Amino acid sequence: MSHSWRTGTVDSDGETIYYEVVGPDRAPTVVLTHGAGGSHAVWYQQVPVLADAGYRVLTWDSRGFGLSTFATGRLGSQEAASDLRRVLDAAGGERIHLVGQSMGGWWATAFALAQPERVQTLTLSNTVGGLWTDALTQHFARFVASAAPDDAVLGVHSALSPSFTARDPARAFLYQQLNTFHAPPLPAIGRALARAHVDHAAIDALGIPVLVITGSDDALFPAALVADSARLLTDVDIVEIADAGHSPYFECPAEYTAALLRHFGRNG
C-alpha cells in the first residue's frame, strides 16, 4: 500500500530538528523516538507496517543525531521534550502513541510529564526512561566501566545480541552502518541520562497506559531489572522478546511491531 511521505524541520532553542511523517493527516499518530545508537532511519522496519495498519507515523532526530543540529551544546530530557513539542506543533498530532527506545525513553517520559494531554499511550523500549532503581543504577555503572568499543569488530555491537550477529551478519553490519552518518554527542548523552530521575508515582499520576518492551539478551538494561522497575507502575504491560538484545525493534521487528499494535489497539 502506498502512503504519503513528507519531511520537515523546525527551529527549537537554537537547533534545527528534522522529522518525517508517513500516512494520512487524520489517522492516529505514532511517534517513534530513537536511542543513542540511531536516528529516524532506524525505524525502517516499523514505519511501513504501522502505516499499513492505519496509523500516521512520525519519526524524528534528537538534537545531535541524524539530520538535527547540535549547535548550542544544550542537551537533556527537558530540551528533548521541548523539541518534540515543536515538532508536533508543526507536523500535527493532538493525541499520540509515544514510543521511546533506550535514550528515547528518557525523552518520552519527559514529554509525557510535560504534555500529558497529548499522550494517549506510552511505550518504553529497552530503557530506564529515568525510572531508576538501585539495581539498575549499579548495573549501568558497571556496564559503562567495562564496555568495549562498538566499532572494533565487523557486525558486533553491544546493542545487538550475539545470536543475531551470528544468524544475520548482513543486518548486523547494517546496524553499524546506520550509525556512520553522524557523530552524536555521546558524553553529553551519558551525563544527561545518568542525572535524569523520574518517580514511578509521577508516571502513574498521568493515567497513561504504559507498555514496557525488553529483550531477553539485553546487556545494557537486563530484562529482569527492567521488569522489576516496570512492576512499580500501576497500569503497565511488560513484553520480553526472546533472543533479542538491546534493539529488538531492529533484531525482531515482527514481534516488536506486533507488541506495539496490541498496545495501541487496547488503548486506542
Image: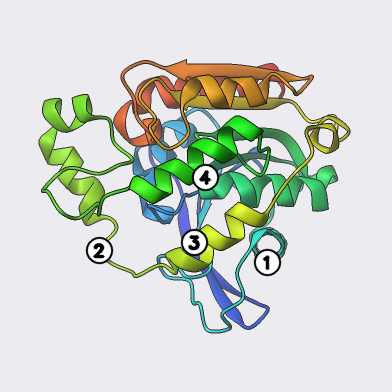
For badge 4, the amino acid type reads Gly
Of 17 and 251, the residue lying toward us = 251
Number of the front mark, 3 or 4: 3
Task: Specify which label sits upstream in the sequence, 1 or 2.
Answer: 1
For badge 2, the amino acid type reads Thr
C-alpha gap between disc 2 and disc 3: 15 Å
Q: Is residue 44 above or below residue 71?
A: above
Q: Are marks 2 and 3 in contact (CB under 8 Å)?
A: no
Relative horizontal placement of residue 190, taking residue 92 as reference (left or right):
left
For badge 3, the amino acid type reads Asp
Q: Which corner quadrant holds the N terminus? A: top left
Helix, strand or loop status at disc 2: loop
Identify residue for label 4.
23
Identify residue for label 1.
79
C-alpha gap between disc 4 and disc 2: 28 Å
Task: Specify which label sits upstream in the sequence, 3 or 1.
Answer: 3
Identify residue for label 3.
61
Q: Can the viewer see residue 55 in this picture?
A: no
Of 21 and 251, the residue lying toward us = 251
Q: Which mark is residue 36?
A: none
Number of the front mark, 2 or 3: 2
Residue at 39% from the left image edge and 50% from the top image edge? 145
